[in-house]
Amino acid sequence: MVKFTLCVALAAWCAGGVWASDVVVAPEAEGVSRAADDDHDAALELKYDNGTRRYFMAFYTGAGTWVGNDFDISAISDYRAITRIRVFSSPAWPNARWDGFRIRIYAYAGGRPGSLLWGPKYVKPARPDYGWCNCAVNWTLPAANKAFVAAFEQFYNYPNGDPFALDTNATFAGHSWQYSGGSWQALPGFGGYRNLMLRVVLNNATVNLAPTSIGRVKALYY
């Protein structure tokens, strides 16, 4: 098994107890979440997280380590336009500024992430506080791919990097991954929390989606 290289975590809140030396505790209250602040114009958003952040996480070595979520669109195979990847992140920690990160899209088959399909693209958010960063993709998934992985790379080394987030659901949805040491593994997470706050937006202004298909996708991802 690939050793999990996560070294720093930002907790939303800690009620007593002793934290390990590699954990930083933030002054924010647990359960704080930001509004979506993004008009999708009738788009469909695929997600596994519950919208509320439990931890911000950062790697000591940001380059070459990716985290991502897999998404299966076989139920709506005619709806393949990926307009954006949304990443929950923050400029406040660990260094009080945005540094920028990279996003990618990988193939997904046989229950594992596979070859690179799109990217990497460098993104430096402009929002003034923490929340959802909307990263433009505007790319169509090839017809041969029934599923894919949308991924985030911190890129810079701690403390000069932007964090990713895990939600407050302690039940692992089974779709979050980490790439490090040359291979993929299920995201180890932190403190029992393993669901990555990373979403994908498919815009039905580009490809028409029947209402019945919307229902099937919501059943999968909500």
Image (spheres, helix red, strand yellow):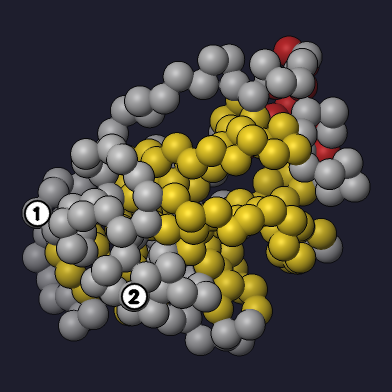
Query: Pointer 1: what residue?
Result: 27
Q: Which amino acid type is marked by label 1?
A: Pro
Q: Is residue 175 visible?
A: no
Could you tell me the amino acid type at mark 2?
Asn
CA neighbours of label 1 inside 10 A, class few (<14), some (14 to 19), many (20+) = few
Identify the residue at image location x=9%, y=54%. 27
> Does residue 61 appear left or right of residue 83 in this picture?
left
Q: CA distance from mark 1 to mark 2?
A: 23 Å
User: Does 186 sit above or below residue 171?
Assistant: below
* Quadrant in which the C terminus appears: top right
Which residue is depicted at the point 60% across and 40% down? 137
Q: Secondary structure at mark 1?
A: loop
* Quarter of the picture holding the N terminus: bottom right
Say which element carries label 2: loop
Residue 207, given in percent of the width and then of the height, sits at 76, 21
Q: Position of residue 221 (x, y in %)?
A: 61, 37
**Residue 54 placed where, x, y %?**
30, 52
Q: Tag on residue 157?
A: 2
On the rendered structure, is 5 left or right of 18? right
Measured as percent of width and height from the top left, residue 209 is found at 76, 18
Farthest residue to the right: give it: 144
Query: Along the horizontal axis of the image, is 84 left or right of 140?
Result: left
Rendering quarter of residue 57 = bottom left
Which residue lies at the image location 37% right of the left edge and 56% below the top edge?
Answer: 100
Instruction: Work out whether 122 lies above or below 62.
Output: above
